Amino acid sequence: MTDLMQVLASGVLMGLVYALISLGLTLIWGVVEIVNFAHGDFLMLAMYLAFTIYAAFHLDPLISLPLVVIALAIFGVIIHKFVIRPVLKAPMLAQIFVTFGLMIFLRGMAQFIWGPDYKAIPDPLVSGSVQIGGVYLSLPQMVAGVGSVLGAAIIAWIVYRTELGRGLRAVAEDREAASLMGISPEKMYIATWALGAGSLGIAGALLVNFFYVFPEVGGVFGLLAFVTVALGGFGSVAGAFIAGIIIGLVQMSAGFFIDPAIKDIPVYLIYLLVVVLRPQGLLGEF
Amino acid sequence: MLVVDKLSVSYDEAPALRDVSLEVTQGELVAIIGANGAGKSTLLKAIAGLLHPDAGSIRFDGQELAGRPPYEIVGMGLALTPEGRRLFSRMSVYENLLVGATPNRDQEARQALMKEVFDLFPRLKERQKQKAGTLSGGEQQMLAIGRSLMSQPRLLMLDEPSLGLMPLLVDQILETLQRLNQERGMTILLVEQNVREALEIAHRGYVLQSGRIVAADDANTLLHSDLVRRAYLGI
């Protein structure tokens, strides 16, 4: 029983982080109609940035988080302006090559700057774990879970409760009609990249407290984000959130009850099943 | 108010409009009629900024529109209710109206406009929390018109507002447009396939055939002209 509770708790905490990571991916897909294969590598940059700020100024990632968010948002806008915008009207294959190429470039650049070694924050501000009713909860993971919920809530609030969010949803549903209503699609694209990449700034600064960072770390989280978005439904914010938690739970359960080495297998099995049985995902509208 | 001069537009080299000139003055209700593929929608899209003309000019209150993006043009007071309504079906009626009000940042002005739209279409007020995609065809058209009105246009262009509606609703929608024009002084440029109904409410009309204007006259004169009677009314 305690084992089960332990797995559930860890699964949900990790799932919340996956949910936050996949929000950006689903937003960018929904509004800009670009599949960003470099999404996980934006997260890698956020983690390295938080790590570097720590290494240089001994500033804890939880404190430098706002800086990392702003830096990532700016980075997202720059990528949009110089890399994505030129291919917005290009064939889908060209768009795939561009974001795939960006992924390889970012990994290479990270290896060049930070080297191939795994890096971690040796003494994070929040560390250790607490015991609640026999269940051990790692404090950094709890902080990451709570932070992810807050981050996701802010994004959901922007998307569903603000004028900007209405504009984003209008462009996502019908770009031409939105422009007839006075909305500049380009402005919405910029806002989407800022939001999508900025949310990875939150996730990166939270993750680096308990997860190693290395040039390929984006591959792990990027792939999970794709599975999460596919399961939740491309373009659906609520779907990404629910799917993130499901993925976290499945991963932790498989790792605990079967073998940690195969924890990702059921996750990708779910992905295959979703693609075959319900391609639009749980709450997808496309 | 709106002066289109020798406008030519093409899709991938294939000409869709050639040397089209027309004029709409303040307070008028002008109808453009013509068969499928005559270029009626192309004309409205070019005026609204969705298509870029090859040649010619489009002037609105003396300002050139050709080359400006749609989101700027609507801010200048020229709104288009597009063909097929193009509502944001996943948003509520209320949100659709708010999106329509994008050019107008003033919250009080928005609420006042919203009230006007609800006065015009009480049905929308009842359904304001409902998703636009769940409305009936007639209600969707009301919402599409209401959404355009939220930008406070001085000239309202409508592309086939009666498309896909049953005859009773067609009359209702066109009557509403006539009221908008007569009671509120809204200048309207209307594209319609329901030739008779459109010419009955319009002041003037243009007949578009294969991308050219072949007749322009008082709506009543057009309605009784041989050209219109033979080609569109089947008399």
Image: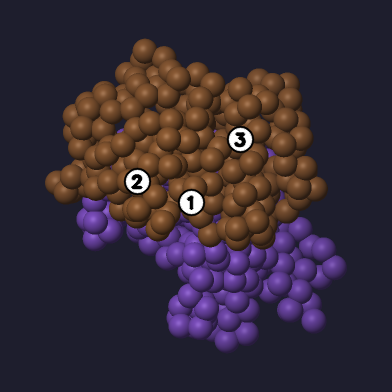
Q: Residue at x 72, y 36 (%)?
A: B120
Chain seen in purple: A
Q: Please report the residue visible at 77 percent of the width from the left and 69 percent of the height from the top.
A: A135
What separation in Å lies between label 3 and label 2 (alpha carbons)? 25 Å
**Measuring 64% from the left and 54% from the top, which residue is drawn there?**
B169
- Do badges 1 and 3 share one subunit? yes
- Indicate the colour of chain B: brown
Residue in the foreground of this view, choosing between B150 and A236: B150
Where in the figure is residue B132, as x and y percent of width and height? Answer: 64, 53
Circle 2 is placed at which residue position?
B226
Reading the image, the residue beneath label 1 is B194
Q: Earlier in the sequence, mark 2 or mark 1?
A: 1
Tell us which disc is closer to us: 2 or 1. 2
Q: Quadrant of residue B118?
A: top right
Report helix, strand or loop for mark 2.
Answer: helix
x, y percent for residue A235 = 52, 57
Q: Is residue B75 above or below residue B202?
A: above
